[in-house]
Amino acid sequence: MYKQDLYSIVTPIKRNVLSKRNSLKNWKYGYDKETDVIVISKTGQIGEIYNIQGLKIALPKAPKKITKGDNLWKPEEYPKELKRIQSIFEWKDYLDSFKERWEPYIDEQFERREKGHWFNNNNIETYITGTHYMYLQWSKIDVGLPDFRESNRLFYIFWEACKADKRCYGICYLKNRRSGFSFMASGETINQATVSSDSRFGILSKSGADAKKMFTDKVVPISVNYPFFFKPIQDGMDRPKQELAYRVPASRLTKRSIQKTASDELVLEGLDTTIDFKNTGDNSYDGEKLKLLVHDESGKWERPNNILNNWGVTKTCLRLGSRIIGKCMMGSTSNALDKGGNNFKKLFHSSNIGKRNKNGQTKSGLYSLFIPMEWNYEGFIDKYGMPVFDNPTNATEDVHGDSIDIGVLEHWHNEAEGLKGDQDGLNEHYRQFPRTTEHAFRDETQNSLYNLVKIYEQIDYNEDLKHTGVLTQGSFSWENGVKDTKVKFTPNPQGRFNISWVPGLNLQNNQYVKNGFKSPGNSHIGSFGCDSYDISGTTDGRGSKGALHGLTKFSMEDAPPNTFFLEYLARPQTAEIFFEDVLMALVFYGMPILCENNKPRLLYYLKRRGYRGYSMNRPDKVWNKLSKTEKEIGGIPNSSEDIKQAHAAAIESYIDRHVGIKEDGQYGGMYFNTTLNDWAKFDINNRTKFDAAISSGLAIMAVNRHLYSPAADQPKQRLNLKISKYSNAGSISKLIEK
């Protein structure tokens, strides 16, 4: 049974606070700092609060009575009497009685455009934003009017929150192929442009030709087919090729405005609003002020064009000083990493809502959204717009009345299974129809130092285990808060450790004292590897993360063999916190650590605390060949080319033997996808940014330290020169028999 985690309904506001403010109708559209929610309601009241990938969004309160319809979405038919009217000028010539009869209908359309719309969908009260309503009701696309999809409803709710939040520059949407984003972005462009004055709207795509095609084939047709009461008079051609210019505003046609325009002469001020497109380039729209920038196919910008450079430029087009005056609507699938995908990946991750600066903004200024393919795959969406995840148990029809016999997940798995012999084909399938962000940013196999087939086999297997509890996030702490006693592990969703195995009580905190130093008692079971850091903070606020990995080997103990059981990738506020985290993990598991000694503070920390016995010496040298510092604190240098090659070879060997599908048909015991992805991208000539790979490789070297031992000195033998010896006692020499 599929369990969705795209969104949840949360209750972060106390009931009495919610009730009081609703009664006062004082909820304002925008970010509410007091409750840390983004209000998209324009009624002064809020209802359900959606958490969509970390963004808490307050919807309007449902009305007491919702107009009964067909119990599913169906666009209302445009009245024939109004369909004949092509412009506001023609409307002027009709009798007042005609205008008054249709005023409530027009007024209602403006109301829905502004505040959104409620309807019953399969007996569920369902809210759609005003932008979504305009898309469904009035935006003609290639197949006519769009179908209602739950995935699009969630997208538009998220987009409305991006518009409402003054801290946000817009959305960075990672999508699957044929999700309808280009049409939705085109519809939003027309929706905003027809009510904006003195504004400019821009379109960019992976090439200038693609941007032009979006403009002529999507934007312009939607504008042409708008009803007269939403459509300003435009300059020039009915179907322009370069620029769409609105000069006459779309006045809200209420009874009051009708009375005002009943004179013989209709005088309306021009909007002076334009929509155009630009050729793809780093400096496109540089120096211009934009109300909305549409970025289509952002994950497919290939060299020499760079989406990161362009966003650095166009971001300034959306603000005046610190005030954000425009928004960006960015969406794309991803190319292979070296074909534009890597830059888009960086932009997507720098838009993470959970990582904000002190101004409350993400690094990019955008908010990232990923909707898995199972929510938006054509042919597997029922007549209510809901995705059919699992195989239906009852008769299920799509919007066209066709039967849906299997769930989208089984269909997707069947397609993936058919591509198992073609890894690059499989990776392309994942990028086009991703179920996870890992799928979306899959690379081509020829671009990796290691066996990507096995790495991705393991990643896919781990994704299927995501909800089985194979990994536990948590923290280590000293028992009763007393250092150098016993360590305990506590599950904690905010913890910095991810673990897949906890040793039995008989193995926990197993240590002994040797030469005055505490030493690990479980070195026969496994070891740790660590990529440390010495400086608590950096001038740019970034710096590498501290990395720690634990790995078992075959033993007679009750422990899974050849399994990475711990992953730690974090940079706490101070280096000392990181050192203490490492120490507690070592003590809890009772295992030694192999650490690079070019950043020695961790090793000195262990020695100072009395744990020198936990720090392994470099395995490629005997004791009397170690330097003075190496004898003092242990560790292994990272400067030696031999060590670098041995480290890379250790990872390669582990992947071949213990990752993905093994010779026995079982999957390996490497459950940490972050580390697997680090291996996939590892560059031996640029090792500094691969903290996880460095740490995990050292763990592999540590458990296989016998492979790196120097050749033992040969015992000295007496040289036999085959010279006979004689006894010279007496007068005759005698041969001494052996």
Image (spheres, rainbow, N blue to C red):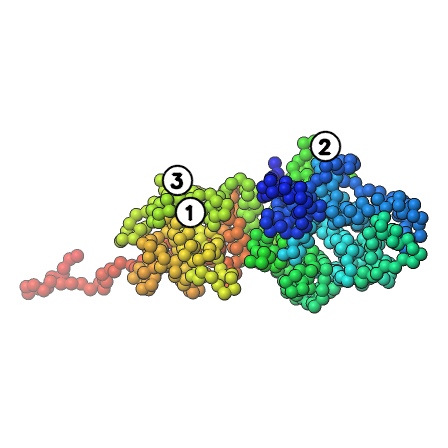
Q: Which residue is mark 1?
A: 476
The structure residue drawn at horizontal position 15% and vertical position 63%, both measured from the top left corner, is 725
Determine which of the numbered discs, if any, sits on residue 14 in the image: none
Q: 569 above or below 303?
A: above
Q: Residue furthest front?
A: 24
In depth, the one of 722 and 449 nearer the eye is 449
Residue 186, by quadrant, is bottom right
Mark 3: secondary structure? loop
- Position of 420 with respect to 517 (left or right) is right
Q: Amino acid at mark 1?
A: Phe
Determine which of the numbered discs, if any, sits on residue 395 in the image: 2
In depth, the one of 60 and 155 nearer the eye is 60
Q: 56 above or below 612?
A: above
**Mark earlier in primary sequence (1, 2):** 2
**Mark earlier in primary sequence (3, 1):** 1
Determine which of the numbered discs, if any, sits on residue 504 in the image: 3
The structure residue drawn at horizontal position 50% and vertical position 44%, both measured from the top left corner, is 471
Q: Is residue 669 visible?
A: no
Which tag is nearer the camera, tag 3 or tag 1?
A: 1
In depth, the one of 293 and 736 nearer the eye is 293
- Position of 612 with respect to 724 (left or right) is right
Which tag is nearer the camera, tag 1 or tag 2?
A: 1
In depth, the one of 45 and 223 nearer the eye is 45
Q: Amino acid at mark 3?
A: Gly
Mark 1: secondary structure? strand
Q: Residue furthest left?
A: 730
